[in-house]
Amino acid sequence: EKTKKIHDYEYSRSIADLIWIKRELGGKDENVESLMYDLLAVDRKVYGDESLEVAADQEGLAAIVQEKGMFSQAEQLLKAILNTRIKICGPDSVEVARSHLEIGKNLAKSHAYREAETYLREAQRINIIKLGIGNMETVACMRELGIVLCKLAKYREAEPIYAEVIKADLMYYKTEECAEVIKSLNTLAILRYAIGRPEAADMLRKVLALREKFYGPYHPDVSDSLINLAALYSSSTQYEEALPMLQRSLEICRSVHGPSHPDTLTCLDRLAELHQKMRHYNEAEAMYLEALRLNQETEEDRDYLVSEIMSDLGQLYARTGRLKEAEEMHLNALKIRKDLFGEIHDSVADSYLNLSLLVNQLERTQEAEVYNSRLTYIKDQLAMGSRIGRSRSDSMSPMNGNSFQKSDPTGFAVSRSISNMPC
């Protein structure tokens, strides 16, 4: 029996070494996943079901299934790890905090933000007690919590968290002129604008200056900062000040990415929207049509971006009295959004609102009531915190890419701060 246990242990370590080698060499997930299940089975024999060794195996397996987008399976594994660590390490241990953090991150990836918030707050509570607020594990947890609070539009709760993150970053990096600190400053500036803090404008200008100095004048992050400032000016109807910001942002996008890149087309859409606000309707329409044409010339799947452009063009047609053309655009946008996200999604609600207003103008009151009924239902479902179903990958989320889409309350380009950091 002793010899068999030694054999099982050596076999377990051999599998673990093989998994590491395959991962380092970029082995296929299917092969690595199969080996992970073998390792888990052997370690259960050697160490028992409830052991830290088995929990470590489950953690590796959870990471693999996460990469495949199998978040429900990952959640089961991560919750099993949490239960094991609570029994062995205690409920307020650092190990348990790490499990809460990983479960929170996994839930956020599947858009279950309210549940994610609960786990991340518990991870933060434990880490502050055990490690202190300035510890980098605590800071990493606060970043993740900040992401989720932003997704839930809890900007007032996210703002003090990011303020603490910046303090810790400055202590760690010793300068503002580094990528991580600049990203955190950018996010804090956005949050402060969203909650009406007057210093937000100066912070956004400071971030632009830091990015220009750190990255040079032609960089995507500089483009994002210009979009942010343009949104700031536009929100106070300072359209003349916003216009050169967006024009320069578009120039950077074209130079860095080319004319058909999603970032370029998104910037072109924003510039067209600004021209529409300035009542430069001919310029706006030309830009919307150019964006649609350039998108059609690519073979990439960019349906969400197309729906945004169509929705904006529909609003332009409605403003200029071309109501039938406006309805066609809004119906096309609605179909794309429902195909992408299902019925329960804020962008679908936007389309129903646009169509309701439009058919009212056309004196089709019964259709308007139907659209209003769908709009009310979606808002109720979103308020209840339903997990938003998506038929495509997470990359289709309006929070991803290079800019917050216009359906987000802030309307700023902060994805590199919120979506991609993580935070």
Image (tube, rainbow, N blue to C red):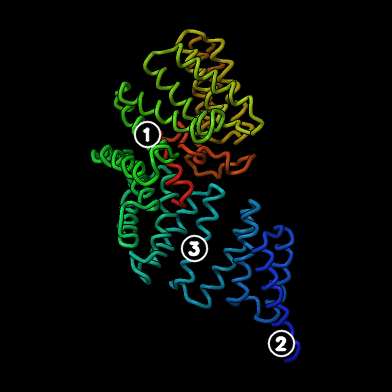
Comparing 101 with 274, the one in front is 274
Estimate the spatial distance between the alpha carbons at disc 3 and disc 1, rounded to whole Å.
Answer: 37 Å
Nearer the observer, disc 3 or disc 1?
1
SS at circle 2? helix
The residue under label 3 is which amino acid type? His
Q: CA distance from mark 2 to mark 1?
A: 63 Å
Number of the front mark, 2 or 1: 1
Q: Amino acid at mark 1?
A: Leu
Q: How many marks?
A: 3
Q: Secondary structure at mark 1?
A: helix
Residue 375 as seen in the image, left or right of residue 221: right
Residue at image position (53%, 24%) is: 309
Horizontal side, residue 375 vs residue 214: left or right: right
Choose between 133 and 209: the one closer to the eye: 209
Disc 2 residue type (three-letter): Ile
- Position of residue 204 relative to residue 177, above or below, is above
Q: Answer with mark 2 or mark 1, whichever residue precedes in sequence.
A: 2
Please, is residue 9 above or below residue 112 in the view?
below
- Residue 73 pos. (x, y %): 65, 57
Q: Residues within 10 Å of mark 2 (few under 14, many from 20)?
A: few
Q: Quadrant of residue 168?
A: bottom left
99 lies above or below 325: below
Q: CA distance from mark 2 to mark 3?
A: 34 Å
Residue at image x 48%, y 13%? Answer: 318
Circle 2 residue: 6
Most foreground residue, 287 or 46: 287
Q: Name the residue tied to disc 1.
A: 226
Q: Find numbered disc 3 in the image and state the secondary structure of the residue it sits on.
A: helix
Residue on which the image places disc 3:
100
Mark 2 touches mark 3? (CB < 8 Å): no
Q: Position of residue 254 (x, y in %)?
A: 49, 30
Residue at image location 64% in from the left, 32% down from the top:
339
